[in-house]
Image: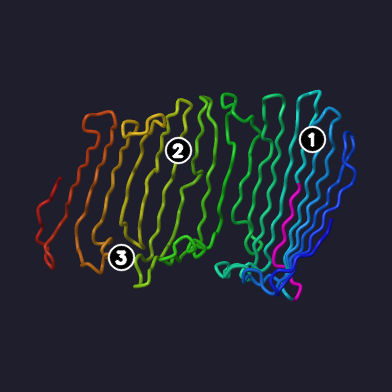
Amino acid sequence: VNGRLIVQSKGAMSFSAESGPIGPEIQSLLEMAMELKAEDLEQTGLRRLSATMNLEFEQKKSGGLDFMNIQTVVSGEDGAGTALISFAQDATMQVTAGEESASFLSDFTLSLPKPSVLSPELALFESIESNGALEMSTNGAKALLSKLNFETLINGEPVVTLQLLQAFQLGVSDALQGDLLAVSVRELPMPWINHFLPDYELSGAPLSLALNLSADSDGGFLLASPDTWQFGPMHLSDAEGALLQDLSLSLSPRILFQANDLCTFDLGQLILSQPGKRLLQSELSGSMDTRVDSLEGLSLDAAIELWLPALFQQPALARSGRIDSGKVDLTLAVDGPQQAPIQLDVLLSDLRRPNSQVALPNYQI
């Protein structure tokens, strides 16, 4: 089967499909192709987009499939024939009926040699590439995940990576122990986040972080950062001007999902600072019973210190005035099952009169 479809008066789409014999115990091949040519596809600079898919399979005499392979290729070019997008995917499933087992393998590659042509938001990057692989097998009702990798490269350098560190059986946590999965982000340009902040502009040092998923002997899963996250210096502005300047943030998140449906979390020591000064320092930890939807399942302890002079030097607060001294200490305790589940203490100290060394009383709430 083949055909051609005229799209308005500015382009055309051609398509074709061809199949060999299909029947039990016969290895069959189905080939499909599509090509779209237009002056400008959705104003992206694409002039030609083509896709092919080959489906190869073999049926069992009693019904069902012994083998199936799907190969997909997508490519796009501009008017000069320069590649703008390239995608390839290969997936294979093999079934062994007598042993009630099956295996599945899949991998893909994606290349955007000129990402800015496809989207103005990607003008920061000369090229973007991604690749990934997945491998699973089943034996009866058991499923084993043995490979899971993903990587994104920007300008040829790895930026986002995900890697399975050990094979494990899905749905079975008792036999698991040790590191399972590692995720890392390296040198991600801060302006890329602006796509998710339509009314603000974020700039500063590139973003890097790492996160590991591991299993403990009690059947729980731990999501934690192997090292302290360090972000900054960062700057945030809106249409009226600067809001935050030269801010740095550090924290060490840790979340434990226990087998009894209890989730405990700890952010470690969270510090917000600017060169030579701390604005905020806090410690926050607690737990949540995921079987309870209300506040009764929550337990939380937080201690927060705020240094007012440094805070009011930030542009967002400097517009409202100036504070030369003072510190705020907040202590928050949440214990859901209690009759008064929330306790909050606030202490204002080290206050002085403007342009004076005369100390003011402390205030406690």
Using the numbered discs, state the Cα–Cα distance from disc 3 to disc 2 in whole angstroms: 32 Å
- The segment highlighted magenta reads 80-90
Using the numbered discs, state the Cα–Cα distance from disc 3 to disc 1 in whole angstroms: 61 Å
- Please state if 252 lies on the left or on the right of 8 as rendered: left
Instruction: Report which residue position mark 1 lands on.
Output: 94
Q: Which amino acid lies under the numbered mark 1 shown in the image of this protein?
A: Gln
The vertical placement of 192 against 183, above or below, is below
Task: Give the mark nearest the N terminus, 3 or 2.
Answer: 2
Q: Secondary structure at mark 1?
A: strand
**Residue at image location 55% in from the left, 35% down from the top:** 214
Q: Position of residue 134 (x, y in %)?
A: 69, 42
When asked about the image quadrant of residue 242, the answer is bottom left
Q: Position of residue 41 (x, y in %)?
A: 66, 69
Instruction: Report which residue position mark 2 lands on.
Output: 255
Q: Position of residue 49 (x, y in %)?
A: 73, 65
Q: Tell me the crowding category of disc 1: few under 14, some 14 to 19, or many 20 or more residues within 10 angstroms, Cα based.
A: some
- Please state if 126 lies on the left or on the right of 200 as rendered: right
**Residue at image location 67% in from the left, 26% down from the top:** 142
Quarter of the image where the N terminus is located? bottom right
Q: Secondary structure at mark 2?
A: strand
User: Are circles 1 and 2 on residues that touch, CB within 8 Å?
Assistant: no
Residue 214 is marked as: none
What secondary structure predominates along the stretch shown in magenta? strand
Instruction: Report which residue position mark 3 lands on.
Output: 314
**Residue at image location 80% in from the left, 46% down from the top:** 55
Q: Tell me the crowding category of disc 3: few under 14, some 14 to 19, or many 20 or more residues within 10 angstroms, Cα based.
A: some
Quarter of the image where the C terminus is located? top left
Q: Secondary structure at mark 3?
A: loop
